[in-house]
C-alpha cells in the first residue's frame, strides 16, 4: 500500500512541478518583456514554437503504452540548445523563454487530442517539460567555469566538441525524463523501482539516441541554414517515427491475436468464458508484484492466455474446463500438449517452456532442486484460484479458494507466489 | 520477384553463364573508365584523405549492415546515402572509390561474382553522380557556400539531380542482370523498380544533402556521420523489429489455428494449403499486397468456425443426419463470430462468412448469387474445393491436378466463379502442386468422416440430387440459424 501512496505523491509532484515551471516561466517572460530584445530572435522562436505545436499533434505510443512526442521533443531540445541564430550571444534568448514557449506550444499542440477525445495525460506533458527545462538550464544557465555557461563558452570550441556537448546535454535531459517516468510507472504497476527503471531505459534507449542526435543536428544546422534547418533535419526523425509506429502497431496486433486465440477454447466449449483472460490479468499483476521484467511479464501474459490450449487435444471437454479438479496425470498431459502446440509456432519458445511446467508441483523445486520458471508457478496459482472462484468472485468464494490453495502451500504452490496473490487481491478490494 | 524494389545484389547470380560473366565484366570496365575520367575531372588532394577514409569506412559499415526484405517492401540502403555524400564532398573519383570499397570489403558473405558486380555498379553510380553534380554547378566539398539560397542552389539541387540519375542507372543496370538470370523483361523491371524504390531514393537524396550540410557548412566534419545516422539506425532497428514481429505474428496465428483445428481430422494442413492456393490466385488476379494478405488470412481462418461444432458430429461417418448437416452448415457464421474482434482481420470477415456461397445462389449461409458473393469468398470457395479434391480420402484416391481442375470447370458457372477457376489454372501453370496423401493412420481414424469441403457435399447441403452417400431434404436450410444471429 505504501508503494502506491508514494507513487501518487511522485505523480503529484511531477504534475505540480510541470505546471509551476510553465506558469513561472511564462510570468517571468511577460514581466521582463522587451520588444527590442525579442525582435531579433522572434523568427527563430516562432519557428520552434510551430515545430513543437505540430510535433505535439503527432504522438507515438511505444510498446507498453508509453506515449511520446518525438518530433516535439527533438524540436524543443534544439530550441534549448540553438547557439547563434542571433548574431551575438548577448542578443540570444534566455532559458526561461525556452521553457515558457515550449509549455505554451505543448498545450496548444494537445488541443487536437482533447477535441478528438483522446486522453492527454498531464504528468506526461509535465514530465516532457521538465526534461526540456533541464536541457535549457544545463545549456543556457548553469555556470560551468568562471561563472560562464555553455552558451558563453562554446564560441571557442571546435564544432565537434560543441556537438558532443549538445548530445550529452540532450541525453541527460532525456534520462531525467525516463527516471521520472519510471517512478510513476513503478507505483502504478506496483513493481520494484529498479526493475521498472531497467524496463523504461530499455524501452526508451533507441528513441533517446535518435532524439539526442536530432536535437543536436537541428541546433547545429541552425547556424548555416537558419530556420529551414528545423523541417529539414526533422525529416530523418519522421522516418524513425513511422518505423516505431509500425512496430508498436504490430506488437498490439500480436497481443490482440493471442487474446482472441485464447478465447477459441472457450468458444469451442472447452473452458469457461473469460477464464483465460482473468488468469492472464491476475498473472500480470502478480508478475509485476514479484518484480518480473517487462519482457518476462509479456511471456507470462501469453502463457497465461494460452495455458488451456492443450485441452483441444481432448475429444470431449472436461466439465467446466477446470483443470484444477482434473487428475494430475491428465493435467500434465494437457500442459504438455499445450506446450507442443505453442512450440509449433517456432517463435514462442519461452511461452512453451512456461506451459510445460505449469502443473509441476512446487515441492519438486524444494526436494529435487528442479528449476521451475516463476511464470509457471504464477500460472499454477492463478489458474487454481480462478478455477475455484469462477466469474464474479465474491469475498466468501475468494476466501474459500485462498483457504484451499493454502492447503497446498509449499507442496503444490510456491508460498512466495501465494503471498503475492494475497497482496494483489487485497489491493483489488 | 522479391528482389525488385531494393537496390543491390541480384541474389540469383549463382550459375555463372558466359552472358552473365560478360555483362559483369562490361559493368566493371565501364566503372573503371568512368573512374579514370573522374580523376581527370577532379583529382583528389591531401585534404581529401580524411573524408575519403571516413566515407569508405562508413560505406563498408553501411553495406555490411544491410538487411533485406524488412517488413514487406521497406529496405534501407545506408550505402546510397553515403555514396551521395561522397559525390558532394569528394566529387566523381572519390565517390567511385567509396562505391568500390563499400561493396568489395563488405562483411557479408556474398559470392565473389556478386561482390564484384556490386562494386563495379556502385562505383559507376558514384562516378556518374559526381559528373552530374559537377556539371550542374555543384560545389565540391560545399566549400565557399554560405546562406540558405546558395546552399540549396550549389549543393541541394545538384545533389538531388545526381540522386535521380543514380536511381535511373541503378534500375537499368539491375534490369540487365535480372534479364540475363531470370528472364524478366527489362522494361517491366525498370518500371517496377522506379515505382517502388523511386520515393525511397528521394529520401536518400534529402538525407545525403543534410549530411553534406552538416559536414561542410556547419563544420562538424566526420562526426556528422554519427549524428545523421543515429535516427536512421533507430528507424532501421524498428523496421527490423517490425518485420520480426510480423513474421512471428503470422506464424503464431497459423500454428495455433492449425492446432486448434486438429479436432477435425480432415482439416489438418488444409487451412494452410488453402492459404497457399489463395496466394497463388492472388498472383493471377493481380491483387494488391494488402488484399493478398487479407485473403491469405481469410484462407487460413476460413474453417475456424468448425471449432464450435461438436467433435462427435465432425467425426461421424456415414450416419450423418440432416440435423448434423445443418449444424455443420453453421460453421461460416461461427467462424465470423470468432474473429470479428480481431481488427487486422477486417478484410477477411466477409470471406470467412460467405466461403460456402454458390454462384447459383444455392450456397449457405445467405444464398447470395453471382457477383454479390464477395470476391475473397469466391476465391476461397475454389481453393477449398480444389484442396479437398486433391487430398486422399478413405473412400477415394486423391484427384490429380488435372482431374480436379476438370471437376471445377464442370461446376464453373453454377457452383464456382469461372474467372476464379481460370485464375487457379493460370496460377497452377506457374507452380507445381502435389496432391496431398494423408497418412494411412490418420485416414484410418478419420474413416468416412464427412468432408464438407468436397464439392459434392455442397450439392448435398443445398438439396440438389447428386451422387451422394446420404439422403437429404430441403429442410436443412431452414434449420440453419438466421443471419441476424451472426451480426
Image (cartoon, rainbow, N blue to C red):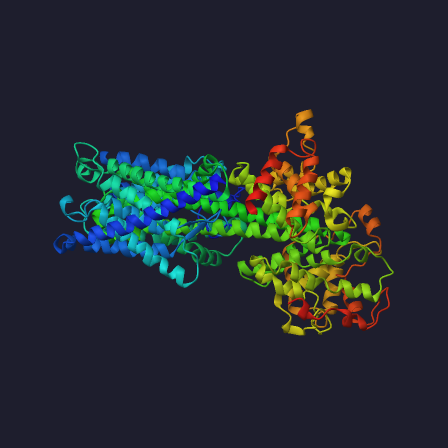
Name the foreground residue: A262 vs B306: A262
**Is residue B66 at least partly visible in the picture?**
no
Rendered location of residue B36, percent (x, y): 30, 41
Rendered location of residue A429, percent (x, y): 57, 47
Name the foreground residue: B341 vs A213: B341
Quadrant in which residue A169 is drawn = top left
**Is residue A223 at least partly visible in the picture?**
yes
The reply, left or right, for residue A376 in relation to residue B396 is: left
Q: Farthest residue in the front direction?
A: A396
The reply, left or right, for residue A336 in relation to residue A211 is: right
Rendered location of residue B355, percent (x, y): 68, 64
Rendered location of residue A123, percent (x, y): 39, 49
Q: Residue at x 39, y 37 (%)?
A: B60
Q: How many marks?
A: 0
Q: Residue at x 65, y 61 (%)?
A: B337
Name the foreground residue: B391 vs B189: B391
Q: Quadrant of the C terminus of chain B?
A: bottom right
Name the foreground residue: B392 vs B298: B298
The reply, left or right, for residue B473 in relation to residue B196 is: right
In the image, is residue B280 above or below residue B127?
A: below
Amino acid at each position: 500500500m505504501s508503494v502506491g501512496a508514494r507513487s501518487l505523491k511522485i505523480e503529484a509532484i511531477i504534475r505540480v512541478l510541470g505546471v509551476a515551471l510553465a506558469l513561472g516561466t511564462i510570468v517571468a517572460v511577460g514581466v521582463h518583456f522587451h520588444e527590442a530584445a525579442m525582435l531579433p530572435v522572434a523568427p527563430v522562436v516562432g519557428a520552434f514554437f510551430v515545430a513543437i505545436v505540430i510535433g505535439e499533434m503527432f504522438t507515438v505510443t511505444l510498446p507498453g503504452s508509453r506515449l511520446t512526442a518525438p518530433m516535439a521533443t527533438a524540436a524543443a531540445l534544439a530550441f534549448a540548445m540553438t547557439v547563434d541564430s542571433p548574431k551575438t550571444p548577448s542578443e540570444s534568448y534566455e532559458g526561461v523563454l525556452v521553457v515558457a514557449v515550449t509549455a505554451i506550444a505543448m498545450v496548444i499542440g494537445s488541443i487536437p487530442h482533447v477535441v478528438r477525445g483522446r486522453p492527454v495525460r498531464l504528468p506526461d506533458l509535465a514530465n516532457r517539460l521538465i526534461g526540456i527545462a533541464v536541457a535549457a538550464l544545463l545549456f543556457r544557465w548553469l555556470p560551468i567555469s568562471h561563472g560562464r555557461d555553455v552558451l558563453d563558452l562554446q564560441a571557442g570550441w571546435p564544432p565537434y566538441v560543441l556537438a558532443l556537448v549538445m548530445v550529452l546535454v540532450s541525453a541527460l535531459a532525456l534520462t531525467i525524463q525516463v527516471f521520472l517516468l519510471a517512478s510513476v510507472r513503478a507505483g502504478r504497476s506496483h513493481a520494484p523501482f529498479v526493475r521498472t527503471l531497467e524496463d523504461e531505459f530499455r524501452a526508451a534507449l533507441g528513441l533517446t539516441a535518435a532524439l539526442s542526435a536530432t536535437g543536436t543536428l537541428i541546433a547545429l544546422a541552425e547556424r548555416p541554414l537558419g530556420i529551414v534547418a528545423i523541417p529539414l533535419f526533422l525529416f530523418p526523425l519522421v522516418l524513425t517515427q513511422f518505423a516505431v509506429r509500425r512496430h508498436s502497431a504490430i506488437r498490439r496486433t500480436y497481443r490482440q491475436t493471442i487474446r482472441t486465440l485464447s478465447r477459441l477454447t472457450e468458444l469451442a466449449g472447452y473452458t469457461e468464458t473469460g477464464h483465460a483472460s482473468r488468469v492472464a490479468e491476475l498473472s500480470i499483476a502478480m508478475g509485476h508484484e514479484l518484480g518480473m521484467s517487462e519482457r518476462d511479464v509479456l511471456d507470462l501474459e501469453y502463457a497465461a492466455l494460452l495455458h488451456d490450449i492443450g485441452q483441444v487435444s481432448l475429444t470431449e471437454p472436461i466439465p467446466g474446463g477446470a483443470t484444477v479438479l482434473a487428475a494430475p496425470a491428465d493435467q500434465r498431459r494437457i500442459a504438455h500438449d499445450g506446450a507442443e502446440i505453442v512450440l509449433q509456432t517456432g517463435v514462442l519458445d519461452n511461452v512453451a517452456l512456461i506451459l510445460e511446467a505449469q502443473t509441476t508441483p512446487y515441492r519438486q523445486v524444494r526436494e529435487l532442486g528442479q528449476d521451475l520458471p516463476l511464470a509457471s508457478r504464477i500460472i499454477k496459482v492463478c489458474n487454481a484460484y480462478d478455477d475455484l472462484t469462477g466469474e464474479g468472485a465474491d469475498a466468501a468464494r475468494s476466501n474459500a479458494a485462498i483457504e484451499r490453495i493454502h492447503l497446498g502451500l509449499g507442496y503444490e504452490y510456491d508460498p512466495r507466489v501465494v503471498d503475492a496473490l494475497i497482496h494483489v487481491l487485497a489491493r483489488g478490494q | 520477384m522479391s528482389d525488385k524494389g531494393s537496390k543491390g545484389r541480384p541474389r540469383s547470380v549463382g550459375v555463372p553463364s558466359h552472358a552473365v560473366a560478360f555483362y559483369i565484366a562490361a559493368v566493371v570496365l565501364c566503372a573503371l573508365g568512368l573512374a579514370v575520367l573522374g580523376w581527370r575531372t577532379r583529382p583528389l588532394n591531401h585534404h581529401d584523405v580524411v573524408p575519403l577514409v571516413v566515407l569508405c569506412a562508413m560505406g563498408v559499415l553501411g553495406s555490411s549492415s544491410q538487411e533485406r526484405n524488412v517488413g514487406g517492401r521497406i529496405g534501407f540502403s545506408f550505402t546510397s546515402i553515403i555514396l551521395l555524400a561522397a559525390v558532394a564532398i569528394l566529387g566523381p573519383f572519390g565517390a567511385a572509390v567509396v562505391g568500390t570499397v563499400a561493396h568489395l570489403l563488405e562483411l557479408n558473405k556474398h559470392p565473389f561474382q556478386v561482390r564484384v558486380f556490386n562494386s563495379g555498379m556502385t562505383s559507376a553510380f558514384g562516378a556518374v553522380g559526381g559528373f552530374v553534380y559537377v556539371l550542374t554547378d555543384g560545389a565540391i566539398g560545399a566549400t565557399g557556400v554560405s546562406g540558405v539560397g546558395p546552399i540549396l542552389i550549389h549543393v541541394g539541387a545538384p545533389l538531388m539531380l545526381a540522386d535521380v540519375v543514380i536511381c535511373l542507372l541503378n534500375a537499368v543496370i539491375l534490369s540487365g542482370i535480372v534479364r540475363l538470370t531470370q528472364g524478366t523483361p527489362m522494361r517491366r523491371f525498370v518500371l517496377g523498380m522506379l515505382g517502388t524504390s523511386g520515393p525511397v531514393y528521394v529520401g536518400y537524396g534529402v538525407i545525403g544533402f543534410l549530411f553534406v550540410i552538416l559536414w561542410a557548412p556547419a563544420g562538424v566534419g566526420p562526426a556528422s556521420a554519427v549524428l545523421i545516422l543515429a535516427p536512421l539506425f533507430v528507424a532501421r532497428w524498428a523496421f527490423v523489429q517490425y518485420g520480426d514481429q510480423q513474421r512471428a505474428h503470422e506464424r503464431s496465428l497459423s500454428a495455433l489455428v492449425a492446432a486448434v483445428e486438429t479436432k477435425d481430422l480432415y482439416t489438418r494442413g488444409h487451412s494452410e494449403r488453402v492459404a497457399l492456393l489463395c496466394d497463388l490466385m492472388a498472383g493471377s488476379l493481380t491483387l494488391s499486397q494488402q488484399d493478398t494478405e487479407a485473403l491469405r488470412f481469410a484462407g487460413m481462418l476460413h474453417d475456424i468456425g468448425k471449432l464450435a461444432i461438436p467433435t462427435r458430429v465432425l467425426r461421424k461417418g456415414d450416419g450423418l443426419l440432416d440435423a448434423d448437416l445443418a449444424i455443420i452448415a453453421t460453421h461460416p457464421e461461427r467462424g465470423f463470430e470468432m474473429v470479428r474482434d480481431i481488427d487486422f482481420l477486417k478484410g477477411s470477415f466477409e470471406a470467412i462468412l460467405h466461403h460456402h456461397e454458390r454462384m447459383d445462389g444455392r450456397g449457405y449461409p445467405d444464398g447470395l448469387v453471382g457477383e454479390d458473393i464477395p470476391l475473397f469468398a469466391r476465391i476461397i470457395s475454389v481453393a477449398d474445393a480444389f484442396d479437398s479434391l486433391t487430398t486422399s480420402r478413405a473412400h477415394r484416391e486423391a484427384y490429380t491436378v488435372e482431374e480436379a481442375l476438370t471437376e471445377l470447370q464442370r461446376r464453373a458457372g453454377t457452383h464456382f466463379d469461372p474467372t476464379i477457376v481460370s485464375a487457379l489454372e493460370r496460377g497452377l501453370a506457374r507452380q507445381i502442386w502435389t496432391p496431398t496423401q494423408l497418412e494411412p493412420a490418420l485416414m484410418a481414424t478419420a474413416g468416412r468422416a464427412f468432408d464438407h469441403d468436397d464439392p459434392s457435399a455442397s450439392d448435398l447441403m443445398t438439396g440438389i440430387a447428386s451422387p451422394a452417400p446420404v439422403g437429404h431434404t430441403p429442410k436443412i436450410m431452414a434449420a440453419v440459424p438466421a443471419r441476424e444471429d451472426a451480426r
